Amino acid sequence: MKIGLMGAGAIGQYLLKHINGNRENHMTVKSVFVRNIEKYKHLEETFHVKLFTDIHEFLESDIDIVVEATNIETVEQYFHTIIKEKNMMSISIGAFSDDTLLKIAQESDSHKLYLPSGGIGGLDLIQNARALGNIDTLTLTTRKPASSLTEEVLSEETIIFEGSAKDAIAKYPKNMNISIILSVAGIGTENTKVVLVADPTIDKNIHNIEVSGEFGQASFTFVNDPLKENPKTSALAALSIYATLERLEDNIVIG
């Protein structure tokens, strides 16, 4: 599989290291789309890739799939162009909060959109429960270090947001991507409840998911270590992209 990577930040360079740095890997990153070639010029020699700043030249290069590791704004800007030409995998899930881009992907005749699970799991159960409309409630409670959410000095945990996933991503676009992938797998952004807690006593992100319906009840808790290359990024989020890419070529599909 020949990959075109969008973005060369912490997750992008993690993927370059673990994909192109693994000689036994059946995947390879061939092209990288960046805003500033000079800033990332060293990646060409280190990982044997070609850099692009023009989206059309990038899409015309020797790639099978586009893997996006940038931000919501970049996805919104280029999604229409990409999905017409290539399959796409996106980590900036917040771009799909209003369903507009999801509908474009659903109506595509020839290309697919892949959304990795990011810093959580259990999405297979939620999709299974949703299959016949059997989800009654779906709640995500996210606890993050207080310093990552507010400049105010807190002495105890404080709920700083409680509402729908749609409102959560609008107010905290850099912190609530997980709420959107959960909503897409489940009952939509308007029906998924989100509670965001600033906690001065923790140094990791903690996500708790509770779902109930005709199938019964389930709960999941995830305590995420940060990516070594960037403490603001979940290690599991980077792993989810790599693992999803690997599964695309598996002959055995689980779940």
Image (cartoon, grey):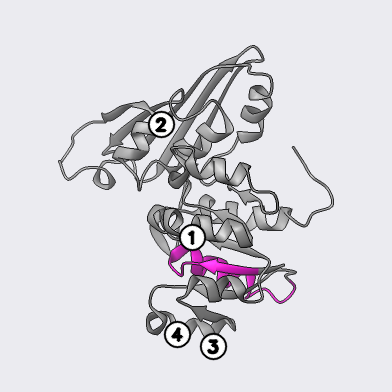
Q: Is residue 70 left or right of residue 19?
A: left
Local SS, label 1: loop
Q: Which residue is mark 2?
A: 165
Q: Residue furthest bottom?
A: 45
- Determine the residue positioned at 45% across, 85% down: 41
Label 2: how many Cα within 10 Å (few below 14, some 14–19, many 20+)? many
- Amino acid at dot 3: Glu
Q: Earlier in the sequence, mark 4 or mark 2?
A: 4
- Amino acid at dot 1: Ala
Local SS, label 3: helix
Q: Earlier in the sequence, mark 2 or mark 1?
A: 1
Name the spot of residue 25 as percent of width and height, x first.
72, 70
Marks 4,3: beta carbons within 8 A = no
- Amino acid at dot 4: Lys
Q: Which residues are magenta?
A: 3-24
Query: In 3D space, how far apart are the residues under numbered discs 3 and 1 (Cα atoms)?
Result: 21 Å
Q: Is residue 20 magenta?
A: yes
- Amino acid at dot 2: Ala
In which quadrant of the rendered view does residue 50 lie? bottom right
**Numbered disc total:** 4
- Determine the residue positioned at 34% across, 32% down: 167
Name the spot of residue 108 as percent of width and height, x first.
64, 48
Local SS, label 4: loop
Q: Which residue is mark 4?
A: 41
Query: In 3D space, how far apart are the residues under numbered discs 3 and 2 (Cα atoms)?
Result: 42 Å
Q: Earlier in the sequence, mark 4 or mark 1?
A: 4
Q: In this rendering, is residue 232 above or below 206?
A: below
In which quadrant of the rendered view does residue 30 lie? bottom right
Q: Quadrant of the N terminus?
A: bottom right
Residue in front for this viewpoint, 78 or 123: 78
Please tell me whether mark 3 or mark 1 is closer to you in this view. Answer: 1
